[in-house]
Image (cartoon, rainbow, N blue to C red):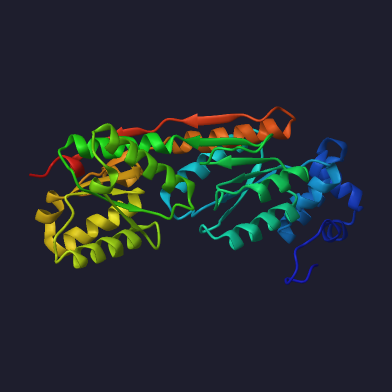
Amino acid sequence: MTNGSRRPSVTDVAQLAGVSVGTVSNVLNRPDRVLPATRERVEEAIRRLSFVRNGSARQLRQGSITTVGALLLDIRNPFFTDVARGIEDRLARDDHTLMMASSDDDPEREDKYLRLFEEHGVLGLLVVPTSHSTEHLAEIQRRGVPVVLLDSPSSVPGMSSVSVDDEAGGEMAAAHLLDQGHRRIVFLNGPHSIRQCERRRTGVDRAVRAAGLLPDDVVEEVLLSSLDAAGGDRALSAWIAAHDGASPDALFCVNDLVAVGAQRCLRRIGGTELLNRTAIVGYDDIDIAAELAQPLTSVRQPTHEMGYEAAELLMRRASGQDATHTVFQPELVVRASSTSRR
C-alpha cells in the first residue's frame, strides 16, 4: 500500500496486483493483450489505490503532447470565460486539455506563467499580451513552442493571431451616442498600454471627427485603476464629486463590467431617475448585459468563436501549417440603457 502523502504510482499498482509494471502498462494502454483475470486484478488494485495515470510522464514517453496553455488577462471577466469555453470546445475535438492562468495585465505575472507553461511542456500557447511588445513571445516561438495571439493582432512573422476590430467597435459606440444627440461623452477607459483600450479610443475619435466635431471638445477620457465593476463605480463616483454632483450626459465604458459599476454608482447617488438620465454603452455584450434592470447597450464581440478559432489556429501551427490572422467584426446591440431616457 502507499503512503497517503504521495500519489500512487504504477509500481504501487503492480505490487498490490502481484504483476509486473509492464502488465499494468498494458492494462492501461493495451487491455486486449492482458488475460481477463489478470486485467480484473489490476483494475481492482487501481480502484483500491485511487490511482490516476501521470499524463505528463506518459506524454514524454510517447513523444506526444496534448496540453495547451492559455494566458488571459483576467478569467473573472465573463468575456474571457466565454473565450476559454471556445478554446476548450475546440481542443476537446482532439482530446487535448487546457491549462489556463490570468496575467492581471501584469508583465511580471505574465512572464512567470509563460515560463511555467514552457517548463510543463505544452503543445503551444494562446496569449492575450499585456503590452504592445511581443518580442518575448516571439522568442518562445523560436524555441519551438507555437504561439497564437488572442484578442490582439500579430506583426511577428510566423505567429498566428485572432482579434476583433476594436477601432470599429469604439467608433460604433461613439457614433451611437452622437446619433442620440449627445455632444459630451465621458469615456471610462483602461490604460493605453492595453491595445484594446488604445484602439477603442482611436475608434471613438474617428466617430467624433466623422460627425464634424473635435475629440477634445466631445470626449473626456477617464483612465481606470481596474477594469471591473468596482473600478467603474470608483471612477464615476470621483467624476461626479469633481463636478459638484452633476452626472455625465453620456458614458462609454471600456467593458460591460465597468458599465455595471457605473450603473450601480448612478443608482446609489440618484436612484432610477439619475440612471435613466444617463446614456450608457458598454463593450463585450456579456450574458448579463441583457438581464440587468436597465438592459445595457453594448458592443458585442464573438467571444466563443474567438476562442475556438484561436485554438484551431494553434492546432494548425503545431502541425506545421503557415500562420493565419483572423479579424472578427464587432456588432452594436442597442438596448434601454442608451435610449430610454428623457
Q: Is residue 261 above or below residue 293?
A: below
- In the picture, measured across the screen, residue 240 lies left or right of residue 137, that is left
Compared to residue 75, the image places residue 284 above or below, namely above
Residue toward you, 250 or 203: 203
Q: Could you say where residue 297 lies in the image, as x and y percent from the top left?
A: 26, 41
Quadrant for the C terminus in the image? top left
Which is more toward the observer, 332 or 190? 190
Q: How many marks?
A: 0
Residue positioned most to the left: 342
| Residue at image location 46% in from the left, 31% down from the top | 328
Question: Can residue 188 be spotted in the picture?
Answer: yes
**Residue at 72 percent of width and 35 percent of height:** 318
Left/right placement of residue 75 relative to residue 257 reads right
Q: Is residue 324 above or below residue 123?
A: above
Q: Is residue 226 left or right of residue 333?
A: right
Q: Position of residue 142 (x, y in %)?
A: 76, 43
Give percent across and percent down for residue 182.
Answer: 17, 42
Q: Which residue lies at the image location 50% right of the left edge and 36% below the top edge?
A: 163
Q: Position of residue 264 (x, y in %)?
A: 23, 59
Q: Quadrant of the N terminus?
A: bottom right
Seen at 71% across and 27% down, the residue is: 321
Q: Compared to 293, does 96 lie above or below?
A: above
